[in-house]
Structure formats: structure tokens, C-alpha cells
Amino acid sequence: MSQKGFVKADADEVNMEIKDWLINQGETAFVDALETSFRPGKVSFFGVSSFGQPPMGGNQLGKIMPHRVLDPLFWMLAKEGIVPTV
């Protein structure tokens, strides 16, 4: 959460990237099931990383730096009007 609120534009971009990736992986039925089971705007895809970066090579991970792990929670809070959306 930056800019003193939930950054909707960032979340929308991640949503489209994850959705496109799922479709490219052959998960169209999964995406369609979610979109038909919930009202528009009530489902969003997120990608989070507990490591914050890809492996450095040789199966070695760098320092663990969580990245965007709280975005799904902030999205829900913003939907309920608890945190501002910017």
C-alpha cells in the first residue's frame, strides 16, 4: 500500500497479467467459472511473492523480501471502503 491508499491501477494491471497467464496455461474454464460465479468487480487475481525476487542461480535464494503479499487484503479493505483507493 503506497501513496496513502490502495493503488487500484497497480492491482488492475496485476489482475490482467495473472488472468492472461492462467488463460495461456489452459485454465480458461477456471477463469470463466470465477467470472460467472461472482458479480463483476468482485473477483481479482493477485500474484504475491514471499521471496520478493527470483532465484539468483544455482538454486540459491537471496534475502527474503516479501513483495505485494498484503495486496489481496488491501483490495478487500478498499472494496469495503475501509482504506482509500488512489
Image (cartoon, helix red, strand yellow):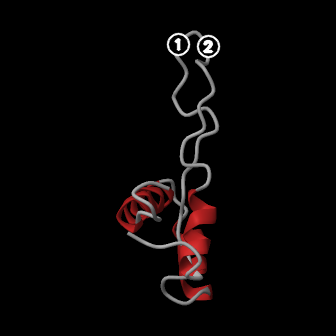
Residue 57 vertical placement versus 67 (above, below): above
Which numbered circle lies on residue 44? none
The residue lying toward the viewer, choosing from 31 and 76, is: 76
> Residue at left 54%, top 74%?
78
Quick check: marks 1 and 2 in contact, CB under 8 Å? Answer: yes
> How many C-alpha atoms fall within 10 Å of the one at disc 1: few (<14), some, or many (≥20)?
few
Q: Can residue 29 be seen here?
A: no
Q: Can residue 26 be seen here?
A: yes
> Residue at left 46%, top 63%?
19
Residue 37 percent location from the top left of the image: 62, 86
Look at mark 1 in the image and give the residue it sits on: 57
| Mark 2 secondary-structure assignment | loop
Rendered image quadrant of residue 16:
bottom left
Look at mark 2 in the image and give the residue it sits on: 60
> Residue at left 38%, top 69%?
86
The residue lying toward the viewer, choosing from 18 and 67, is: 67
| Gap in angstroms between the C-alphas marked 1 and 2 | 6 Å
Q: Residue furthest bottom?
A: 39
Left or right side of 70 for 17: left
